[in-house]
Amino acid sequence: MTPLSRRSFLSTTAVAGALSAAAGAAPAVALPWQPKSLERPLPLAETSTPALIVDIDQVEANLKTMADYLKARGMGLRPHTKTHKCPYLAHRQMALGAVGVCCAKVSEAEVMAASGLTEILITSPVVTREKIDRVIALAKNCTGLQIVIDQAQNATDFDAAARAAGIRLGVLIDLESGTRRTGVPMGDAAAALARHIAPLKHLRLDGIQCYGGHVMHIGDFESRKAASLSMLAEARDTRLRIEADGIPLRNFTGGGTGTYDIDVAVEGMTDLQCGSYLVMDLQYGILGAPEGRIYDTFPQAMFVWSTAISQPVPGSMTIDAGLKAMYRDSPRPELRGITGVTYGIGGDEHGILSLENPSRPIRLGDKLALLPSHCDPTINLYDHFHACRNDRVEALWPISARGMSQ
């Protein structure tokens, strides 16, 4: 059984079936990745916890804000699906003008392609025979599939596999941006790799990728701007160095949510790989913006819904959202709309609220909204989003690529 059908069964049959019985969901007639509307909207107060909630109107507003901003400046958007793992949201991004989507892993790309998406860039190197074969199989039907390469042998291996399959595969050179994670060093080393790839008959050298994850969360805006522009200037010079060898490059992709309003001005850059902007998290919420403002262009549209379940000692409250409900990162998750409370992990199943000076009383049975520190790995803990409007759950959005980390 394929990973997609296994995940589809878990997310749409087991989960949606249970909610259908409880909330009167319409009979399942949509494809597994499509939203499952509820016949009767479910009040948020009646929603079982822990649950991952998204505000429909705010998600749509964030999607439109980014699309309009980049479109007005002539920059393409190639959003990263590793954030939301949800084909429905990827299709919404494409409908608003995205030039394609990014996927971090092969299995994630398989899920997105199965939903009908064709313009997909796999942003991490693929080197094992098993995964190379999976990419080649995917490329036979996914005409816009591209991969990244950062070593000559990997290019040779992919060329041989593509030749055996009778296809030609688009590739981008992955540049080492300073993250020390993946990529070939910029400059001469990247140019040498381009000269190796260009003659390979079953690979098409489309461009370069330069993603600087290490600069996305630099707090001060001017420092973040300087770091990103310096990195991308070196990438731009590398592109020119490759093109000076007579190798044209049509794609120069990179950037992200933390630097979208900086990288948009980089000469020669074709598209940005923003991901978190549609739901956001506290890590982005503490960044600085131009003119001393706080980075609030894209308001948080997602929270973890939890219940206060125990009070074993005065001054604290236990909730049902621990490590299995929310990824632990800094800054600490916060309660939405309540101050004077500090959240701490109480194990796999529990969170512990320290009630220093709550702005309102918290009682057993109360439902509470937690703003996560890091959206991507938190989303990966759930089978679906509860899509909510005006405190009523209207639909389930399957997170079909949840757990697809291969």
Image (cartoon, helix red, strand yellow):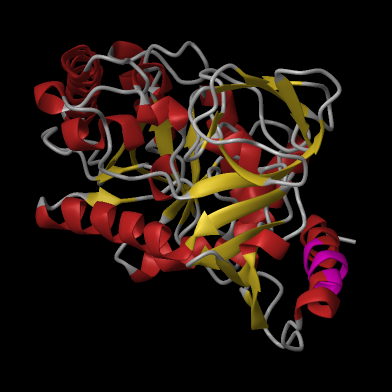
Nearer-the-camera pick, 342 or 226 = 342
Residue 256 visible in the current orientation: no
Total of numbered circles in the picture? 0
Nearer-the-camera pick, 129 or 368 = 368
**In the rendered image, the vertical position of residue 269 relative to residue 237, given as above or below:** below
**In the rendered image, the vertical position of residue 385 relative to residue 240, given as above or below:** below
Residue 16 visible in the current orientation: yes
Q: Which residues are magenta?
A: 11-18
Q: In the rendered image, which quarter contains the C terminus?
A: top right
Was residue 10 drawn as part of the magenta stretch in this picture? no
Q: Position of residue 322 (x, y in %)?
A: 76, 30
Q: Residue at x 66, y 83 (%)?
A: 40
Nearer-the-camera pick, 273 or 148 = 273
Nearer-the-camera pick, 204 or 381 = 381
Q: Quadrant of residue 112?
A: bottom right
180 relative to 273 in the view: left or right: right
Q: Position of residue 240 (x, y in %)?
A: 16, 27
